[in-house]
Image: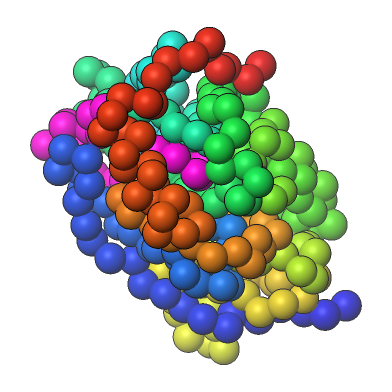
């Protein structure tokens, strides 16, 4: 066995996006060890004014989004004819492909909100593919419990401390997989991965120990290469969003909501959007 270790720790940065929504953001557009994960946003506030404006209609091209809500509700609508609503524990997946215009707005009854949006890169061969969308209610997510951990699999197949768990979503690019992992104080869990995969974890509650030092919430852990990674919780436990996927190793050109491979492709995306070429096609819901 080749055990992984924490090779880098990256702090999240407070930011605002959409119509003034407060977020904690980690970007990995040019970070090889995060590939194919492009960005992780944590949305978390007890105050509606921090997120009431939501994310009004805006375009995307060349990437996928996965929105996972732990608390509160979000409504998705897009120009492909899709509409979906998820509440605490559910997820929404969208593959923007050649172009989507969508909005993500908090439900009227949401007073406190906690969730994540992850951007996943699409390979060059799929960046102009047909847009797709899917809702995953909380009841469809897979859960496993042990004396050491609670795990919720949102996407992909996982093995945690020799316990297999498979999420309902397998449409993420490059076999990207997402797991919500919670550990009680002092407990540890071992996550299996392919040697070639990127494997990272965002600490959103509690802390994780590295050489006896606590790494607290709002930090991203980037692992070294290997096929097993043992994560140990700090004295108050830990909650982590764990992500993995096969690196694309392709050039990334990024401008706002567009992620392509070259500046010329970004310029084309801007022109297509400004000239109304992000038009509605047949509904693109994935069952």
Q: Is residue 75 left or right of residue 23?
A: right
Q: Residue at x 29, y 46 (%)?
A: 44
Question: In the rendering, at what x and y percent does residue 63 appear?
Answer: 50, 44
Q: Relative to the observer, which residue lies in front, 265 or 162?
A: 265
What's drawn in magenta, residue-wise?
A: 40-65
Q: Residue at x 16, y 32 (%)?
A: 53
Task: Please tell me in which quadrant of the rendered image residue 152 appears.
Answer: top right
Q: Residue at x 22, y 18 (%)?
A: 108
Q: Residue at x 44, y 11 (%)?
A: 81
141 versus 232 height, above or below: above
Magenta segment: does it hold 64?
A: yes
Q: Is residue 39 left or right of residue 242?
A: left
Question: In the rendering, at what x and y percent does residue 90 appear?
Answer: 50, 29
Count of residue discs: 0
Magenta segment: does it hold 234?
A: no
26 versus 210 height, above or below: above
Residue 264 can be seen, yes or no: yes
Quadrant of the drawing holding the N terminus: bottom right
Q: Is residue 133 left or right of residue 229?
A: left
Q: Is residue 266 left or right of residue 223?
A: left
Quadrant of the drawing holding the C terminus: top right
């Amino acid at each position: 066995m080749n055990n992984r270790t924490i090779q880098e720790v990256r702090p999240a940065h407070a930011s605002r996006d959409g119509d003034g929504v407060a977020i904690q953001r980690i970007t990995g557009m040019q970070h090889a060890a995060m590939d194919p994960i492009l960005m992780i946003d944590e949305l978390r506030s007890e105050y509606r004014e921090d997120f009431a404006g939501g994310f009004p209609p805006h375009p995307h091209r060349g990437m996928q989004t996965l929105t996972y809500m732990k608390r509160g509700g979000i409504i998705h609508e897009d120009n492909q004819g899709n509409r979906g609503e998820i509440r605490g524990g559910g997820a929404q997946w969208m593959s923007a492909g050649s172009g989507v215009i969508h909005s993500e707005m908090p439900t009227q009854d949401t007073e406190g909100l906690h969730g994540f949006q992850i951007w996943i890169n699409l390979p060059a061969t799929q960046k102009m593919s047909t847009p797709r969308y899917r809702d995953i209610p909380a009841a469809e997510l897979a859960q496993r419990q042990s004396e050491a951990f609670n795990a919720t699999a949102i996407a992909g197949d996982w093995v945690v401390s020799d316990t297999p768990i498979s999420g309902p979503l397998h449409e993420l690019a490059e076999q990207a997989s997402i797991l919500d992992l919670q550990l009680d104080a002092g407990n540890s869990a071992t996550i299996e991965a392919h040697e070639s995969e990127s494997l990272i974890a965002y600490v959103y509650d509690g802390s994780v120990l590295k050489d006896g030092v606590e790494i607290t919430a709002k930090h991203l852990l980037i692992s070294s290469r290997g096929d097993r990674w043992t994560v140990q919780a700090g004295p108050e436990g830990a909650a982590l969003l764990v992500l993995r996927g096969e690196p694309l190793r392709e050039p990334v050109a990024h401008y706002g909501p567009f992620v392509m491979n070259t500046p010329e492709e970004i310029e084309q995306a801007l022109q297509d959007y400004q000239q109304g070429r992000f038009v509605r096609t047949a509904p693109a819901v994935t069952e």
